[in-house]
Every structure is written in structure tokens, then in C-alpha cells.
């Protein structure tokens, strides 16, 4: 693998469902009932390209939260919109939300810290993953899934899910990650 970044793990837990999702509404209802707040969300597995992709999307979310410029009313929905690289909330759900038939996903926690007014002046909490691990494991169990020992990697399929087509299958993982980051950066244009 050709991607190495000096960033901590983002608070994201890869999960696999006991069977492919049949009743998405029921799954979302159970998740929303048990999640601790609107900083917890379910993300389609291919929508997360890397730790840098997740932290960059989170940083954009925090800037929008701090300046009251979110397109969505809640941080979980805004994160889905941003990571999908769209200004449209519905398109964000279509690209990065779960679908009937999905077998795995990410449970995401969006940390709430950081004054993001100054570019490059935010320290990432290297313990965010560990601090929220127990809560994530409880949610994983409550929605009838189990944790997978994986971290996000950029894929062509993931790009296709967020609306990018025609990518050469011979590009490197770093190049795929860069396309994800570019798409996310264009979400408000």
C-alpha cells in the first residue's frame, strides 16, 4: 500500500451485518434510538477513503459548525453531504448512506472540539478512537453487527458510489485518495 499519513485513526469502526440489510428503515430506527447523539452516524463502507479523508471531512464540518454555515441541520447529515462531495443533502444520502443489500458499513463518531478558524492550527485528538471505542462497541452490538478489523482504503468502487466515473483502474491508491479529497472539497461549489 502506498499511503502513509501521520494522522491518528479517525473514530470509525468497520462493521459487518449478520446478513445483508433487508429493512433499512428498521436498522436506522434502531441505530437512532440507541446512538448517544447526532454526532454518531452510519456511513456506507466505500464512502470512506482514508484517515486523511475522514479527518479532512470532519475539519470541514467543524468549520461549518463554528461559522453556522452548515447546509444540513445536524452534524451527521452534514458529514454525509460533505463526504459525498455534493451540496444536495438527498444526494449525500444516496451516495454515502446505507442501502438495502449492504453487508458492511462504518459507525462514525464526529468529535466536537477544535477551534478551526486558523488554517492548519488544529491539533487532532490522537485518543478520539480509543475514548469512544466502548460506546461504538455497544452500538455495534445493538444493531446486530460485529466489528471488522479494517481501516478505510480508497477504492474505484467508492469513487463510483460518490458519483465519479471513468477513472482508470491502473491509478495508485494515493491518486484515488486525492480524487476523494478533491470531490469532498468541491461539495459547496
Image (cartoon, grey):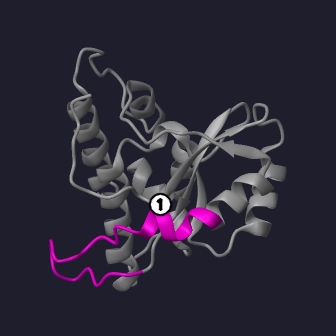
Please check the rendered image and state whether residue 118 is part of the magenta-colored stretch, yes or no: yes
Work out whether residue 143 or residue 92 is closer to the camera in this orientation and state it: 143
Which residue range is magenta in the image? 113-134
Q: Please tell me which residue is depicted at 80% across the width and 47% down the height of the picture.
A: 144
Work out whether residue 6 or residue 88 is closer to the camera in this orientation and state it: 6
Work out whether residue 146 or residue 88 is closer to the camera in this orientation and state it: 146
Secondary structure of the magenta portion, mostly?
A: loop
Q: Which residue is mark 1?
A: 11
Q: Residue 156 location in percent, x, y?
A: 38, 25
Residue 150 in view in this figure: yes
From this view, report whether residue 124 is shown above or below residue 50: below
Residue 188 in view in this figure: no
From this view, report whether residue 132 is shown above or below residue 50: below
User: Which quarter shows the C terminus?
Assistant: bottom left
Q: Residue 19 location in percent, x, y?
A: 79, 31
Q: Secondary structure at mark 1?
A: loop
Q: Please tell me which residue is depicted at 40% across the width and 80% down the height of the picture.
A: 65
Q: Residue 108 location in percent, x, y?
A: 54, 58
Amino acid at each position: 500500500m502506498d499511503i502513509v499519513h501521520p494522522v491518528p485513526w479517525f473514530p470509525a469502526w468497520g462493521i459487518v451485518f449478520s446478513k445483508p440489510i433487508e429493512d433499512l428503515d428498521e436498522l436506522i430506527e434502531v441505530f437512532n434510538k440507541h446512538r448517544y447523539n447526532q454526532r454518531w452516524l452510519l456511513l456506507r463502507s466505500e464512502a470512506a477513503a482514508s484517515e486523511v479523508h475522514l479527518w479532512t471531512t470532519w475539519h470541514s464540518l467543524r468549520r461549518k459548525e463554528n461559522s453556522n454555515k452548515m447546509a444540513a441541520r445536524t452534524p451527521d447529515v452534514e458529514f454525509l453531504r460533505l463526504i459525498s462531495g455534493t451540496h444536495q443533502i438527498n444526494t449525500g444520502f444516496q451516495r454515502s448512506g446505507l442501502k438495502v443489500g449492504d453487508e458492511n458499513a462504518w459507525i462514525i463518531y464526529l468529535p466536537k472540539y477544535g477551534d478551526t478558524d486558523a488554517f492548519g492550527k488544529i491539533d487532532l485528538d490522537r485518543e478520539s478512537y480509543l475514548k469512544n471505542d466502548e460506546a461504538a462497541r455497544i452500538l455495534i452490538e445493538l444493531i446486530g453487527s460485529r466489528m471488522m478489523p479494517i481501516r478505510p482504503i480508497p477504492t474505484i468502487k467508492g469513487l463510483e458510489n460518490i458519483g465519479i466515473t471513468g477513472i482508470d483502474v491502473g491509478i495508485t491508491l494515493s491518486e484515488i485518495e486525492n480524487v476523494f479529497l478533491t470531490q469532498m472539497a468541491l461539495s459547496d461549489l
